[in-house]
Image (cartoon, helix red, strand yellow):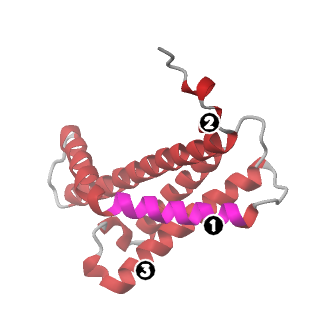
Amino acid sequence: MLLDYSARFAHLWSEELDVDMRSVISLLVAVLVGYSLSIGINSTISAATLVGFGIEVSLSDRLDMIAKEWVGLGTIYLPLYLVLHAVCFWLLGRVLRGAVLTTVVARASYAGIGAMSLMAFYLTFDAVMGSGGVVVASTRTTAGLLAHGATGAVSGFLFQWLSTAPGQTH
């Protein structure tokens, strides 16, 4: 029995499918890394607040906080991050299509749109829900908002880096 279906069905595999799968996998990895960094930042700020109140927070407590926040906020924020980044990266890709860019400029563009998209998301969420409705408490401060924006920049950079084929400049 033949296990290599591409030999029998040449139309099932194509260069376009390879590019699309690379983009999907790159998006998933970028979102998961950015979301994990975002949760790490939020947990660290929450632990620092507890320490400021005089409560001792051990390493196992911190790791437990990260795990619980990752799962607990994942049902809300992970799909939102995925949709937000998918739309923003797709739109930027459409805008940059055909443009001759260096690798540095392309990666900086994706990092910038990743950062701006998350900052706009948090600011919009805050405007709609008010500061009491912010689920990610660390975004209430300017430093926390910028830190979460940086996680969006990491996501954008990773997406562009992973989705670009070796030898391709943009």
| Position in image of residue 34 (x %, y %) | 46, 52
Could you tell me which residue is drawn at 35 percent across and 85 percent down?
Answer: 128
Please, what is the three-letter code of the amino acid marked with disc 2?
Trp
| Position in image of residue 47 (x %, y %) | 25, 54
Task: Please provide the residue range marked out in magenta.
Answer: 77-94
Q: Nearer the viewer, mark 3 or mark 1?
A: 1
The one nearer the camera, 159 or 115, is 159
Residue at mark 3 to residue at mark 1: CA–CA distance: 19 Å
Asked whether 3 falls inside the magenta stretch, the response is: no
Mark toward the start of the polypeptide (3 vs 1): 1
Could you tell me which residue is drawn at 45 percent across and 73 percent down?
Answer: 121
Please, what is the three-letter code of the amino acid marked with disc 3?
Thr
Residue at mark 1 to residue at mark 2: CA–CA distance: 26 Å
For the residues bearing labels 3 and 1, Cβ distance under 8 angstroms: no
Which residue is label 1 attached to? 91
Could you tell me which residue is drawn at 19 percent across and 38 percent down?
Answer: 60
Which residue is label 3 attached to? 124
**Is disc 1 surrounded by few (<14), some (14 to 19) or many (20+) residues within 10 Å?**
few
Q: Is residue 149 left or right of residue 8?
A: left
Residue lying farthest right? 100
Q: Is residue 43 left or right of residue 90?
A: left
Asked whether 79 falls inside the magenta stretch, the response is: yes
Q: Quadrant of residue 168?
A: top right
Residue lying farthest left? 55
- Majority SS type along the magenta span: helix
Q: Secondary structure at mark 1?
A: helix
The one nearer the camera, 60 or 80, is 80
Mark toward the start of the polypeptide (1 vs 2): 2
